[in-house]
Image: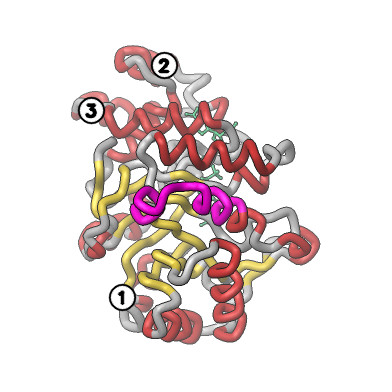
Amino acid sequence: MEFRKLGKTGWEIGAVGLGAMPLSLKDERPDEKDAIAVIHAAVDAGVNLIDTADAYCRDDSETGHNERLIGKALAELSGETREKIVVATKGGHIRPEGRWETDGRPEHLREACEASLKNLGLETIPLYQFHRPDPEVPQADSLGELKKLKDEGKILQVGISNVSMDEIENAEKVVDIVSVQNQFSPAHRNPETDGTFAISLARNIAFLAWSPLNGMDNARKLGENSPEVREIAANHGVSPQTLALAWLLSKGPNIIPIPGASRKESICDSVKAADVKLSLEEIVRLDTCWKQ
Ligand SMILES: NC(=O)c1ccc[n+]([C@@H]2O[C@H](COP(=O)([O-])OP(=O)(O)OC[C@H]3O[C@@H](n4cnc5c(N)ncnc54)[C@H](OP(=O)(O)O)[C@@H]3O)[C@@H](O)[C@H]2O)c1
């Protein structure tokens, strides 16, 4: 698989990452053994960025569910393979009774980070992302705590998620930011116009595109209603989903889509996107014809 740099870290990352969320959040989520097999299939296919969060669980009775699956999957790999994997987790969301709420208080983020270290079985988290700005807490306070955790060696690098252009600019005044994780897909094109992608590219910040296939519930339908999408995909011998990821990759050298998967077949198909080279004409056609 083609490698890309994770922003200014210089880390070599497979151009397609794995979004581990469906392993915990899909209604019919796989059992533990099958979930671990999906993570191993991704690694075997060349994936070395695994995105997770403490909040990827059904509710707060199982906070860290997704991280524990990854911790178990990593423990079964050889040391040499494990060392190449960048686990990107997040803190700042809580799941009372399954709801999504924010908690960006410094004391919560410290507690959450320490729990994530245990869940993942790591001494240092390679990439820790602030999941979502908390309207009740100044961003500088939340990120200030992540800077402390970085200085203490509990995390290596800091990323932010669900942020505006101004929030990216302000975050950089508090701590070095190596990644921005925002929604970007054929159905959700805001980063092309809201300045978040442009500023990330200009500042050498990796852009991790979340729900790049239009989300867990829509991914299967992608391209269904567009003969043009199906035609371009067929010309390259790939699925519309792989084509969508290749189109995202064409947007810039700093973009790394993190498609979710709860089945091995999905991630093994998705990684093929890194080898699809789209012509300028195809990129322009896709820019105008994406439909769900
Ligand atoms: N930062 C945030 O706030 C935030 C929010 C949402 C998501 N995320 C991250 O982004 C990741 C991806 O988002 P997502 O999982 O919501 O949505 P997504 O990647 O758009 O779609 C995921 C679904 O796509 C299916 N799929 C994947 N590759 C496929 C292929 N090649 N062909 C057909 N179907 C395919 C999978 O089906 P199967 O399940 O059947 O394998 C999976 O359930 C998440 O896992 C999570 O890590 C972050």
Which residue is painted at 43% across and 23% down in the image?
Answer: 240
Query: Who is closer to the viewer here, 245 or 64?
Result: 64
Q: Position of residue 143 (x, y in %)?
A: 44, 80
Q: Which mark is residue 176?
A: 1
> Which segment did they paint magenta?
69-84
Residue type pointed to by label 2: Arg
Residue bearing mark 3: 277
Residue type pointed to by label 1: Asp
Q: Label 2: state its secondary structure.
A: helix
In the rendered picture of this protein, how many numbered marks are placed on residues?
3
Residue type pointed to by label 3: Lys
With respect to residue 87, does 150 lie above or below? below
Q: Work out which residue is located at the far front of the displayed protein and give it.
A: 78
The verdict on label 1 being within 8 Å of ligand 1 is no
Crowding at dot 1, Cα within 10 Å, few <14 / some 14-19 / many 20+, comes out as some
Q: Quadrant of residue 9?
A: bottom left
Q: Position of residue 179 (x, y in %)?
A: 35, 62
Q: CA distance from mark 2 to mark 1?
A: 41 Å
Tell me: 1 left or right of 265: left
Q: Label 3: state its secondary structure.
A: loop
Main secondary structure type of the part rendered in magenta: helix
Which numbered disc, 3 or 1, marks the residue that appears first in the sequence?
A: 1
Tell me: 111 left or right of 267: right
Q: CA distance from mark 3 to mark 2?
A: 16 Å
Which numbered disc, 2 or 1, marks the residue that appears first in the sequence?
A: 1
Q: CA distance from mark 3 to mark 1?
A: 32 Å
With respect to residue 75, does 15 lie above or below? above
Please identify, in this view, whether the residue under mark 3 or under mark 2 is nearer the observer.
Answer: 3
Q: Which mark is residue 21?
A: none
Please identify, in this view, whether the residue under mark 2 or under mark 1 is nearer the observer.
Answer: 1
With respect to residue 77, does 231 lie above or below? above
Residue bearing mark 2: 230
